Amino acid sequence: MENQYQIPSELKSAVDGKCPRCRTGDMFAAPLLSFRSKKMHVKCPACDLKFEKEPGYFYVAMYISYAMSVAELVASCVITYWLTGNMESPWLYVIVALAATLIFAPFNNRYSRVILLYWMTPMFKFNPKIYQQVKEGTLKA
Ligand SMILES: [Zn+2]
């Protein structure tokens, strides 16, 4: 039988926070813009993949999150300079940097883990067979 399912693209699945192996189950228990957005499923609800493959694995995501924060701080300060032309007051940049850190924190937390699991964990690869089994409901746990 031909595969009649439209497999979602890798980028779309990553942006939606889907499991890297089956691209069906949610990695996170709540949407990005909610107070519980940091809550993550231990295992994929669809294919049972354990997301934290070894204890402390998500510490690696901190480094990714750090790199993302630095990029966002530099970008927001450059944009502030571009919009205001301010070269006198350092407080403007301190306030902008603090606000950017707070605003982007949930985003960084989520997408640092998504980047880690999608593109920096070779053992978590998309498996079309598991995707099809999940869609057909024939996956044996
Ligand atoms: Zn899965």
Image: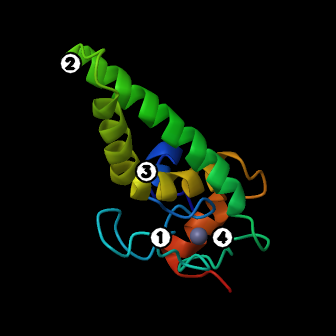
Alpha-carbon distance for marks 4 and 1?
A: 11 Å
Q: Which residue is mark 2?
A: 83
Residue 3 sits above or below residue 93 on the image: below
Within 10 angstroms of label 1, few (less than 14), some, or many (20 or more) residues? Answer: many
Amino acid found under the numbered disc labelled 1: Asp
Amino acid found under the numbered disc labelled 2: Leu
Q: Does label 4 or label 1 sit earlier along the sequence?
A: 1
- Left/right placement of residue 112 relative to residue 16 reads right
- Quarter holding the N terminus is bottom right
Alpha-carbon distance for marks 2 and 3?
A: 29 Å
Q: Which residue is mark 3?
A: 15
Question: Which residue is rendered at x = 42% and y = 55% of the image?
Answer: 105
Q: Does label 2 or label 1 sit earlier along the sequence?
A: 1
Amino acid found under the numbered disc labelled 4: Phe
The numbered mark at residue 41 is none
The numbered mark at residue 26 is 1
> How many callouts does the rendering have?
4
Alpha-carbon distance for marks 4 and 3?
A: 16 Å
View extreme (left): residue: 84
Quarter of the rendered image showing ligand 1? bottom right
Residue 138 appears anywhere in the view: yes
Alpha-carbon distance for marks 1 and 3?
A: 11 Å
Q: Which residue is mark 4?
A: 51
Q: Position of residue 27 (x, y in %)?
A: 51, 69
Q: Does label 1 or label 3 sit earlier along the sequence?
A: 3
